[in-house]
Amino acid sequence: MKKKSITEPRTSHTFDAYTNSEIRRAAETGIYDIRGGGSKRSLPNFDDLLFLGASISRYPLEGYRESCNTKVILGDRFSSNPLNLEIPITIAGMSFGALSAQAKEALGRGASLVGTSTTTGDGGMTKEERGHSKQLVYQLLPSRYGMNPDDLRKADAIEIVVGQGAKPGGGGMLLGQKINDRVAEMRTLPKGIDQRSPCRHPDWTGPDDMEIKILELREITGWKVPIFVKVAGSRPYYDVALAAKSGADVVVVDGMQGGTAATQEVFIENVGIPTLACVRPAVRALQELDLHRKVQLIISGGIRNGADVAKALALGADAVSIGSAALIALGDNDPRYQKDYEKLGTTAGSFDDWHEGLDPAGITTQNKKLAERLNPKLGGRRLANYLNVMTMEAQTIARACGKNDLRNLEPEDLCALTVESAAMAGVPLAGTNWIPGT
Amino acid sequence: MHILDFNKLSLRDINKTLQESDKNSFFSVRNPKGSHALAVGINKKITVKIVGSVGYYCAGMNKFSDIKVEGSAGPGLGENMMSGNIYVTGDVSQYAGASGHGGSILVGGNASSRCGISMKGVDIIVKGNVGHMSAFMAQKGNLVIFGDAGHALGDSIYEANIYVAGEVASLGADCIEKKMTKKHLSNLENILSNANVSDYNPDTFRRFGSARSLYNFNVDNAKIY
């Protein structure tokens, strides 16, 4: 009989359990893994930054007595009717189709309660979101699904989507399981087919064309509403400069933690750069053009709490945008549906097969029964609570740094915990004056 | 008839006048000098004659109106139009009728690449040739080509119809030639009749459309991508 080994079985870091399971899955199915959400890998992020609260060299504001402004105006460069937001946190573009009508309504209700905006997505504008969103940003996407001039004129702002942090250089994806009659009709496509949206706009390429496209949109809407340009975090310095040069009122930069309704896992985890690394190059591009604060910058991708908001603003953003976090506030991945998640082979907190339309929380689905699980009024209230909490958290930090306006936060209020985050954020390593790369 | 002269008015002035005009008005736009975004976002039944060539996105997102360009047009003619009619006597550049949902476009000359890209219901008639990748991802509507079609015609096409009287350099992924049935012949004749085109022989046209093999992912089709 062979003697039992006295050493522990050794697993491979290269071929870990998840990697092995993915190889087996690929071999079995013949298709890449598709999922929703953003990057799940460990990345340098806003947690790697800390605020330097006031003491002797700077003095703080009273936490519950002295005011700290949270309002922000977006899009006053060229438009006559910019967005006036009560808080610097907006709701990112998410489509009807990817989300249920109830979820879109809940987002609109929640955002409107606190005075901020929501954004449409691939597939056009639904009456639910227009009806319940006081300030609605209408996306112009490469697919142009559901795009029509009547809705364009109903919008409070227009967002030209060039890219998305989860998939820079890629198009949207909505698989057949979620293409019911209403979604198919809105997108002018047959029911039940896999919709793989194009990655490029059908009628322009490059910044010179985009400038003319912006001119067309302004002429159609009478120069009234702001034009946003959304780019994925990949080359933020150049992309932001080109978007501003093309005439954008607002530039949105979406880092790789930003979510998607569905795309390839390999895309989500291997293309693009972390949100933290996007902010300073984007701000520098605007500063060099003397457009910082004139063209507003919105940062998105993995924003979770008031600290993230405060850090993004301190690095130079004018506002942030949230998607995944808003869905969690509505009930996405809630442990109360643990048994349902287990039936789908996953757990609360890990569920990301949003493309299959079986979301137990009724958010990323077109299944009528599942969608009815989400009460839009209650969901809206939850989202409003969450947005209020984030805002108060950001104010708490700002006051501690002696700021009476969230946008008065500055890079000098920050230090970094790691060399990597110090280099990416352009702030000193904690306890030093060293900013790597400068 | 109202005359709008670019030598005297700005683009904003001209577009605002067109957009806010009374129904059934008639305008003649003079000296366009290749201007971009001209006659865009019109939302009522008016008639606009543009005397001269235009730049990008002429008649973009048109609804209801009849727009004639006596000259040539730049990229994105009638992009995302919903209804109405556009007639260009000369040639048109790239992306003519891109993502158009309805109405019709008649091109007297040639159309460049990606004519009818992502079209969603518009009818496009080109009396000359079309460039490569025309009707790319075309979802609905009809592209009628009297001349020749460039490479990769109808790549990744959905439910749109393509009718070609001339030669086709090559077909794109998932685009195949289909039988010209009586129903489709009648459809072709209706499209041309609606555009007041009568000088053609219907027997010279062939029909192309989707093989529908890429509608749902199948690993055995991966080599097509």
Image (cartoon, coloured by chain):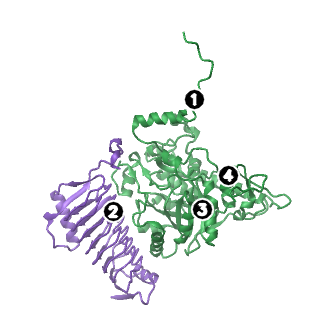
Q: Are marks 2 and 3 on the same chain?
A: no
* Extreme residue in the bottom direction: B8
Camera-nearest residue between B206 and A401: B206
- Chain on which label 1 sits: A
Q: Which mark is residue B124?
A: none
Label 2 neighbour load within 10 Å: few <14, some 14-19, many 20+: many
- Chain on which label 3 sits: A
C-alpha gap between disc 1 and disc 4: 30 Å
C-alpha gap between disc 3 and disc 1: 43 Å
Q: Label 3, on which residue?
A: A298
> Which label's residue is closer to the chain start, 3 or 4?
3
Q: Label 4, on which residue?
A: A421
- A285 with respect to A174 (left or right): right
- Which amino acid is tagged 2? Met
> Which label's residue is closer to the chain start, 3 or 1?
1
Q: Label 2, on which residue?
A: B119
- Residue A223 x %, y %: 51, 75
Camera-nearest residue between A247 and A105: A247
Picture residue at 47% right of the left edge, 68% below the top: A154
Residue A344 at least partly seen: no
Q: Nearer the viewer, mark 2 or mark 1?
A: 1
Q: Quadrant of the C terminus of chain A?
A: bottom right
Picture residue at 34% right of the left edge, 72% below the top: B93
Question: In the rendered picture, chain B carries what hue?
Answer: purple
C-alpha gap between disc 4 and disc 2: 46 Å
